């Protein structure tokens, strides 16, 4: 994490309310690390009615750039010196950039970010039909974006028809004002059936009438802009009818908690390309960052900042791990459960770093675990394990596969630390399977006994419940290959890059 500050540190931040669960610091701090720019990003919770003071204060303090989130995206506009035409058309601003004369200019990178995420996924809007589900704060600018990027026709479907109608009217007017003059309705009537000079590119519909779309359009791009499916309501989609998804060519869900929403599952099962709203979140931040740091610099930064696809992918990976709660993926289990092999395969598949706690202690101490046990005793070794976890947790370790020593989860203190570090996966294995896997392995002193199988059973009885207690996810590994176990972990934790 970039947390070094000095006299030249640039300050950027976020104003909104609430801001406590924001992912923006993660993205911006990663960006400053990747680009080598000396910057910190701070969320500011602004109380109701305080947005004007916040802007004044930010200007006085020399804050370089701000993001703006709910509920201030429109309220902030009167305090700006200038506004970009796209943001003006949308009527909402989420990024403020310092002007040369010392004010802020407002931009809407939510929408440029959505567009960039579409381009990133090879989704083209020109001449296409778009179906927007929902008519709230995100649906309206999305409709405007699609219209301004040449979508042929945009349907807005909403539970409350009146809101869909208002959004359609507003966006049609804004598109007309920005110069999009091609009309779709030959008879020139608006949604209320009244004559209109304004082209009706955006057409409102009642949500329950979605089947009417099929007679008009065979395939369309669907933008899921309702809050249905958002955690904890993870088993719902705003339209659950599988037939609808047969008509979807691309399904984009604005909701990104969970990462793989029911809408995305249904669209994916029907063969559509699916895109997560997390990409939009990523690119709105990247667009803001590029606006803040392009051009100016007295400290010798590159004059032009352009975040590459590879850099964006790297940050996206961190976001996915964060959203799934799997900051690190931690494997626990009995000897012979496949921890070591599976952790290697998993790290390889996900391109993550690997940390084996036993190996890390051996390396740090310069002696074997047997030596440590023999000279200082088991307690001492357990203390080393706890110290290692404390360091990992205080240094905010991220994006690692961590393979745990078999006895590590036995300490309650360690289990608490593991909970903070990431998701714990228990590789559960029957004693007979363990015995088959380790019976010829001489390096296991614990099994140097007359009846190793009985010893394994006894140890599993003692430890099994504790492993279960520490686990977020349990996999029975007896019938699976290490590669299958790794795939199950990826699927079970919902990790999709
Ligand atoms: P909003 O203004 O509150 O609008 C919510 C929409 O959902 C309305 O159209 C509402 O319909 C509809 N809706 C809610 N419950 C429904 C239900 N049970 N059945 C049918 N429709 C229902 O919200 P918003 O600001 O547009 O945000 C929508 C979602 O986008 C949020 O959940 C948020 O997670 C996500 N989002 C993502 C990003 C990103 O960067 N990816 C950015 C912002 C927001 P009615 O009009 O009938 O009430």
Image (cartoon, grey):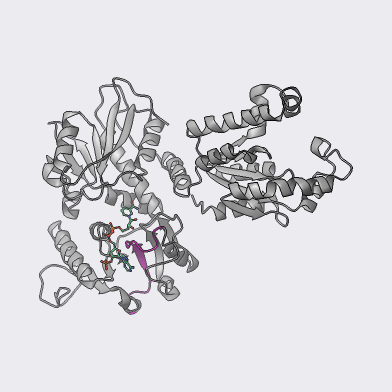
Horizontal and vertical percent position of residue 358 = 67, 33
* Position in image of residue 50 (x %, y %): 16, 42
208 in relation to 402, above or below: below
Does the segment drawn in magenta span residue 227? yes
**Can you say whether 484 is above or below 63 in the image?**
below
Q: Nearer the viewer, residue 66 or 381?
A: 381
Q: Which residue is at 30% across, 25% downward? A: 9
The quarter of the displayed image where residue 152 is located:
bottom left
Q: Quadrant of residue 451?
A: top right
Q: Position of residue 396 (x, y in %)?
A: 47, 34
Q: Quadrant of the N terminus?
A: top left
Spot the residue most to the right: 450
Q: Quadrant of ligand 1?
A: bottom left
| Residue 328 appears anywhere in the view | yes
Q: How many marks?
A: 0
Residue 415 falls within the magenta-colored stretch: no
Query: Closer to the camera, 58 or 49?
Result: 49
> Between 452 and 84, which is closer to the camera in this rendering?
452
Question: In percent of the image, x 70 and y 53: which residue is there?
Answer: 481
Q: Residue, x 17% and y 33% (percent of image)? A: 57
Residue at 62% x, 38% y is 411
Q: Is residue 115 left or right of residue 354?
A: left
- Is residue 272 something that shows in the picture? no
Left or right of residue 497: residue 280: left
Left or right: 452 as drawn, with respect to 243:
right
What is the x, y in percent for residue 119? Answer: 36, 52
Magenta range is 215-231
């Amino acid at each position: 994490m970039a947390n070094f500050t000095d006299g030249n540190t640039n300050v950027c931040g976020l104003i909104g309310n609430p801001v406590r669960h924001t992912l923006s610091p993660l993205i911006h701090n990663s960006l400053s690390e990747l680009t080598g720019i000396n910057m910190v990003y701070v969320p500011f919770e602004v109380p109701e009615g305080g947005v004007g003071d916040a802007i004044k204060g930010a200007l006085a303090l020399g804050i370089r750039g701000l993001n703006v989130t709910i509920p201030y995206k429109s309220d902030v506009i009167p305090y700006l010196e200038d506004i970009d035409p796209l943001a003006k058309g949308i009527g909402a601003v989420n990024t403020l950039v310092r002007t040369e004369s010392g004010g802020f200019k407002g931009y809407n990178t939510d929408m440029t970010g959505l567009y960039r995420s579409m381009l990133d996924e090879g989704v083209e809007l020109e001449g296409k039909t778009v179906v927007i589900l929902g008519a709230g704060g995100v649906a309206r600018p999305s409709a405007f974006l699609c219209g301004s990027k040449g979508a042929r026709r945009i349907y807005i479907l909403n539970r409350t028809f009146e809101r869909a109608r208002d959004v359609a009217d507003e966006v049609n007017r804004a598109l007309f004002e920005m110069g999009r003059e091609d009309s779709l309705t030959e008879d020139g009537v608006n949604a209320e059936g009244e004559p209109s000079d304004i082209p009706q590119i955006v057409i409102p519909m009642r949500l329950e009438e979605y089947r009417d779309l099929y007679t008009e359009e065979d395939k369309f791009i669907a933008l899921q802009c309702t809050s249905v499916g958002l955690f904890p309501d993870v088993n719902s989609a705003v339209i659950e009818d599988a037939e609808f998804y047969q008509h979807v060519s691309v399904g984009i869900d604005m909701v990104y908690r969970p990462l793989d929403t029911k809408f995305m599952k249904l669209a994916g099962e029907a063969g559509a390309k699916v895109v997560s709203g997390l990409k939009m979140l990523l690119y709105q931040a990247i667009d803001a960052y590029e606006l803040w740091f392009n051009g100016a610099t007295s400290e010798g930064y590159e004059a032009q900042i352009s975040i590459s696809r590879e850099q964006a992918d790297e940050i996206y990976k961190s976001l996915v791990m964060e959203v799934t709660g799997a900051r690190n993926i931690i494997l626990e289990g009995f000897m012979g459960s496949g921890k070591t092999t599976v952790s290697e395969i998993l790290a390889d598949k996900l391109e993550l770093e690997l940390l084996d706690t036993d190996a890390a202690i051996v390396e740090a101490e310069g002696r074997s675990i047997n030596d440590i046990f023999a000279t200082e005793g088991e307690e001492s070794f357990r203390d080393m394990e706890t110290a290692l976890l404390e360091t990992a947790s205080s240094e905010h370790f991220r994006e690692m596969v961590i393979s745990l020593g078999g006895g590590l989860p036995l300490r309650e203190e360690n289990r608490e630390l593991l909970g903070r570090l990431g998701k714990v996966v228990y590789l559960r294995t029957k004693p007979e399977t363990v015995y088959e896997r380790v019976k010829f392995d001489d390096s296991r002193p614990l099994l140097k006994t007359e009846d190793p199988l009985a010893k394994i059973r006894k140890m599993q009885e003692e430890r099994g419940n504790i492993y279960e207690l520490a686990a977020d996810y349990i996999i029975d590994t007896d019938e699976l290959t290490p590669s299958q176990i790794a795939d199950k972990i990826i699927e079970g934790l919902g990790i999709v890059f």
